[in-house]
Amino acid sequence: MCPLRSAFGASRGAGNRFPIQGCSVTETKSATLDVVAIGNAIVDVLARADDAFLAEHALTKGGMQLVDTETAELLYDNMGPGMEISGGSAANTLAGLAALGKKCGFIGQVCKDQLGDVFAHDIHTLGIAFDTPARTEEPPTARCLILVTPDGQRTMNTFLGASQFLPAAAIDKALIQSASILYLEGYLWDPAEPRAAMRSAIAMAKDAGRKVAFTLSDTFVIDRHRDDFLALIEEGMIDILFSNEGEITFLTGKSDFDAAVAALAPKVPVLVSTRSEKGAIAVVDGVRSEVPAAPVAEVVDTTGAGDLFAAGFLAGHVEGLPVADCLKLGAAAAAEVISHYGARPEADLKQIRAKTLA
């Protein structure tokens, strides 16, 4: 059995014996959806590659870079045979939540083109509400060229295309306020137009007494928007913060993980951070729970591991499960997705949930 890169098992300490304290979902009006997410509407194109190919194209193994049209076309022309699967970080999380039986909605921008139709079809098939009007002009629908090396590491090259032009007018207030949790993808904070749209959505959610969850996504996003993220945290706009070890240390400027957690946890009701083979932690109202990395038979493709971990954790959270169970569900969902190519679950997550929490 190989260690799971981004999924985690059982908790320790007092946090595993009682429901989440101080972060249960309570609103002034009953919610009809569990989670509404705002994120990049992307179609992933996955292909196998070796380290030599990455070196030839000056790509950082395991990283994510934004590319322009010219670079996207060059990589696409040179990469091996691939498969197209609807993706996008927040949309992947919703796919996991929907597979776990949760009611979800998505807001994201596509173009009226072939890949835009693919994305819309795929997300509707999952039973996720998605009604953002498609753009009729350039640029085309976003796509992420994902090169998977034999060790399962994925190197992502993202052309944001239409997704970076999500306007504030596309934010459906009724949809935002119908959900228990608004989930925001850090990647989409980079372009100005969707950043403004997400700020508007945060205000709508807070006005309705809803929770706001945010995923930091990547250190390059933090590097460009650290002040914004810290301000949102200081102002109490973020109720649930997802990160990995590199992101939380980068955000806080602390070289030590525990020091970074200690600096940030008092400012966020629910802080969740994954640590690859070292497991994951969640700090809820000052109580820290830890889990080891869950096993997986073979790491095939780590694409979407963090996204599905968030799906499992949020699924448990909206049910009011103990912190330990939320972490276990995150681990189980992430373990499933890294066992095959693509960032969407293939196995029955409801069955996996039942076994995990038995």
Image: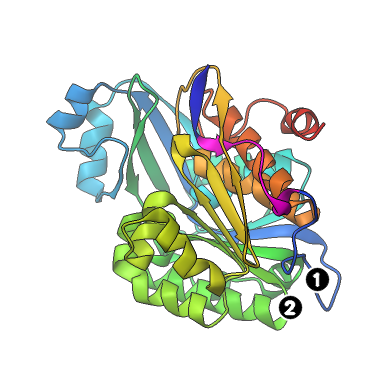
Mark 1 near mark 2, Cβ–Cβ under 8 Å? Answer: yes
In the figure, is residue 199 to the left or right of 190?
Answer: right
Numbered disc 1: secondary structure: loop
Q: Residue at x 49, y 71 (%)?
A: 167
Which residue in the structure is indicated by mark 1? 26
x and y percent of residue 95 in the render? 64, 42
In the rendered structure, the answer to whether residue 54 lies left or right of residue 225 reads left
Seen from the viewer's position, the closer of residues 33 and 216 is 216
Residue 60 to residue 267: above or below: above
Is residue 317 positioned above or below 8 on the image? below
Residue 132 is at least partly visible in this image: no
Residue at the (47%, 38%) spot, across then down? 278
Magenta residues span 6-16
Residue sitting at x 44%, y 56%: 258
The verdict on residue 279 being magenta is: no
Residue with the mark numbered 2: 209
> Which residue of the protein is positioned furthest toward the front in this rendering?
13
Look at the numbered disc 2 and give the secondary structure of its residue: loop
CA separation, marks 1 and 2?
8 Å
Q: Quadrant of residue 164?
A: bottom left
